[in-house]
């Protein structure tokens, strides 16, 4: 219930609901720093390929660098600025892992962007045997431990309040706004900082002597209806602790794709070897990020740019190429046409998850043995280059490109 006296509460319910907004801190740069820890604590930005700053570290922000700034201008401000090319697929994989972690805390998650999510924590205190703040701390520490990136979290009664709260203590902050403290928070919140209120609407509201979020909710709803449309009335109610913006549970459906073009060829063994090589590269990236694919898509492109593809649902999620070669060969045989010239092959691993489950009919000892083998192979390939050690079925690709093949053949019995 709205009170005219700002010293009194706007909402009398402390926790009638609990919506968390999780916002990763300097996400793109944080992903780069997680993969290359030597970049931590330094002025780092991404966007080299575009010639402008698209994301930057907090250290770079403190120097006065801003998003959208041209590289030469940014370098003039900070000579030590490290500018990297963007790797959006890598950022998507970090995003998948982050959302998988959030699923451990609540079944109701709404993806807002690649690095932001709303999580409905209502009624989960008993399940976790923790307060809402302790749940937020657990989310933070789990993401930090497993992904080596930080997130800021806001928790309140509605999505609008939670999103405002998550900005208060960035980076790596936690802010809770129970219903009986909403008025304190809104008193110091400029109207232009409210989620959903753009510059033009903020300008209009200021002309109506509404400069803070508290002044906004103190107005009579009929007064606001004279000047604003329905979405802003929803925001008005959300700021009062009344859920008006629908919570729509949805999770990202990210994927890993690898494709390689080559001189047109009609040699079946070579074309298939290119496909296997793509599978190995995509699978390596999945293992690097601790992800398992539930679906495999295979595509071939002819010399006249005609594309044929097939999607296969996997019996168990995996990131091990040797477990997929039979499936790959079957898919290849269904879309490959003898005699046609092809110029590109591609692989897409999709429906990614961070957990794998064992089929009752699978040989778990065999799978664990394969996993140990790939851990060793990944170390070798990481040190000496991709495909230094590869499946024999991808060797035709190297041979066609006249690479040096004076390599020992490793016969592994599994």
Image: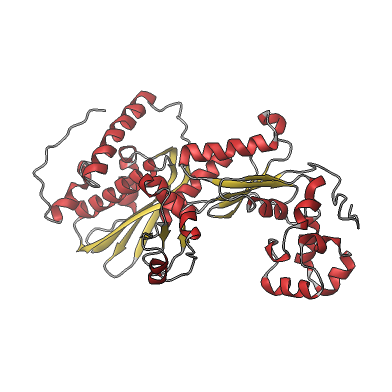
Residue visible at 48% across and 45% down in the picture:
149
What residue do we see at 78% from left, 70% from top? 229
Residue found farthest to the right: 4
* Residue closest to the far top: 365
Q: Position of residue 255 (x, y in %)?
A: 44, 51
Where is residue 297 drawn, in percent x and y?
40, 51
Camera-side residue of 383 and 153: 153
Q: Is residue 113 left or right of residue 157?
A: left
Q: Nearer the viewer, residue 334 or 206?
A: 206
Colour treatment of the image: secondary structure
Side of 25 where 335 appears, left or right: left
Question: 343 or 17: nearer the eye?
Answer: 17
Q: Is residue 366 above or below residue 340?
A: above
Q: Quadrant of the C terminus?
A: top left
Q: Position of residue 124 (x, y in %)?
A: 70, 35
Picture coordinates of residue 155, whole percent (x, y): 69, 45
Please indicate whether residue 243 sits to the left or right of residue 277 in the image.
Answer: right
- Rendering quarter of residue 82: bottom left
Specify whether residue 311 is in view: no
Number of labels in the image equals 0
Quadrant of the rendered image containing residue 164? bottom right
Image quadrant of residue 338? bottom left
As displayed, is residue 380 above or below residue 251?
above
Measuring 26% from the left and 49% from the top, which residue is drawn there? 277
Inspect this view and state whether residue 87 appears.
yes
């Amino acid at each position: 219930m709205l009170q005219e006296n700002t010293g009194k509460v706007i909402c009398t319910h402390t926790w009638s609901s609990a919506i968390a907004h999780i916002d990763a801190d300097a996400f793109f740069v944080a992903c780069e720093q997680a993969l290359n820890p030597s970049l931590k604590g330094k002025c780092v930005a991404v966007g080299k390929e575009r010639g402008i700053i698209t994301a930057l570290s907090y250290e770079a922000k403190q120097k006065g660098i801003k998003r959208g700034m041209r590289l030469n201008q940014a370098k003039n401000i900070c000579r030590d600025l490290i500018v990297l090319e963007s790797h959006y697929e890598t950022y998507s994989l970090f995003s998948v892992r982050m959302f998988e972690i959030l699923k451990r805390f609540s079944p109701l998650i709404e993806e807002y962007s690649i690095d932001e999510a709303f999580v409905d924590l209502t009624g989960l205190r008993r399940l976790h045997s923790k307060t809402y703040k302790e749940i937020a701390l657990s989310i933070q520490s789990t993401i930090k431990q497993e992904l080596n990136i930080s997130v800021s979290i806001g928790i309140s009664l509605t999505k609008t309040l939670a999103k405002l709260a998550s900005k208060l203590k960035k980076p790596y902050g936690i802010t809770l706004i129970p219903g009986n403290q909403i008025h304190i928070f809104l008193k110091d919140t400029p109207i232009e900082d409210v989620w959903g209120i753009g510059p033009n609407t903020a300008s209009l509201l200021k002309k109506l002597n509404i400069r803070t979020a508290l002044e906004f909710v103190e107005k009579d709803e009929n007064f606001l209806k004279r000047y604003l449309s329905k979405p802003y009335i929803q925001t008005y109610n959300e700021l009062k602790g009344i859920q008006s913006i629908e919570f729509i549970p949805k999770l990202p459906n990210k994927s890993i794709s690898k494709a390689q073009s080559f001189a047109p060829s009609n040699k079946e063994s070579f074309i298939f070897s290119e496909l296997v090589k793509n599978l190995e590269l995509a699978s390596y990236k999945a293992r690097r990020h601790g992800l398992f694919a539930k679906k495999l898509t295979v595509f071939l492109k002819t010399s006249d740019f005609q594309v044929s593809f097939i999607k296969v649902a996997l019996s168990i999620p995996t990131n091990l190429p040797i477990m997929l070669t039979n499936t790959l060969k079957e898919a290849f045989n269904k879309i490959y046409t003898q005699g046609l010239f092809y110029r590109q092959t591609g692989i897409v691993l999709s429906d990614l998850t961070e957990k794998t489950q064992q089929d009752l009919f699978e040989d778990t000892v065999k799978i664990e043995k394969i996993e140990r083998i790939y851990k060793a192979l990944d170390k070798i390939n990481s040190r000496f280059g991709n495909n230094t050690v590869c499946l024999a079925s991808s060797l035709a690709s190297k041979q066609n490109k006249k690479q040096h093949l004076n390599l020992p053949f490793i016969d592994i019995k599994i």
